Image (cartoon, rainbow, N blue to C red):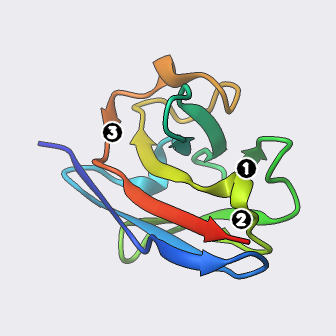
Amino acid sequence: QVQLVESGGGSVQAGGSLRLSCTASGYSVRWYCMGWFRQAPGKERKGVANSDSDYTSAYAGSVKGRFTISKDNTKNILYLQMNNLTPGDTAMYYCAASFSSTCAAVSITGQYSYWGQGTQVTVSS
């Protein structure tokens, strides 16, 4: 049974940093496309970044240059390093797992089969 558990969210001031973790069980982060999404209150869920089995990464334009997605194959964890955070980054962040070795566009939710429960990120000005 695949389980994804996010952690690392919290409250920070603008300009600060957070690192989100997504710990996977029943699944290998190494061999498949995984992604991060976020959803602000009253808004639709949006893709943030994804990373495939060859470590090719893609980012939404709004986070490119500030966020970095990575995998720790030994610990079986997907990370999202978030720097220079702004209030616009405030949202619930979700990790997602697919059974494809390659990723489609960052925005495509349908490529993922499993989702975590989310971790809240709040950025104050």
Question: Which residue is outermost to the left?
Answer: 1
The relative height of residue 80 versus residue 8 in the rendered view (above or below) is above
**Residue for badge 2:** 68
User: For the residue labelled by badge 1, is the local secondary structure a helix, a strand or a loop?
Assistant: strand
3 horizontally vs 53: left or right? left
Give the quadrant of the N terminus.
top left
Identify which residue is drawn at 51% across, 76% down.
Answer: 11
Cα separation, mark 3 vs mark 2, equals 19 Å
List x then y, in percent, for residue 34: 50, 44
The relative height of residue 6 versus residue 42 in the rendered view (above or below) is below
89 horizontally vs 66: left or right? left
Task: Give the residue type that dot 3 points to.
Answer: Trp
User: For the residue labelled by badge 2, is the local secondary structure a helix, a strand or a loop?
Assistant: strand
Cα separation, mark 2 vs mark 1, equals 9 Å
**Where residue 57 is drawn, which disc sits there?**
1
**Where residue 33 is drawn, which disc sits there?**
none
Callout 2–callout 1 Cβ contact below 8 Å:
yes
Is residue 116 in view? yes
**Where residue 115 is drawn, which disc sits there?**
3
Is residue 80 in view? no
Task: Give the residue type that dot 2 points to.
Answer: Thr
Q: Which of the marked residues, 3 or 2, is nearer the chain's N terminus?
A: 2
Q: Which of the marked residues, 2 or 1, is nearer the chain's N terminus?
A: 1
Relative depth, front residue between 21 and 90? 90
Identify which residue is drawn at 62% across, 32% down.
Answer: 103
Identify which residue is drawn at 71% across, 60% down.
Answer: 87
List x then y, in percent, for residue 51: 63, 48
The relative height of residue 34 versus residue 110 in the rendered view (above or below) is below
The relative height of residue 12 versus residue 85 in the rendered view (above or below) is below
Task: Give the residue type that dot 1 points to.
Answer: Ser
Relative depth, front residue between 38 and 36? 38
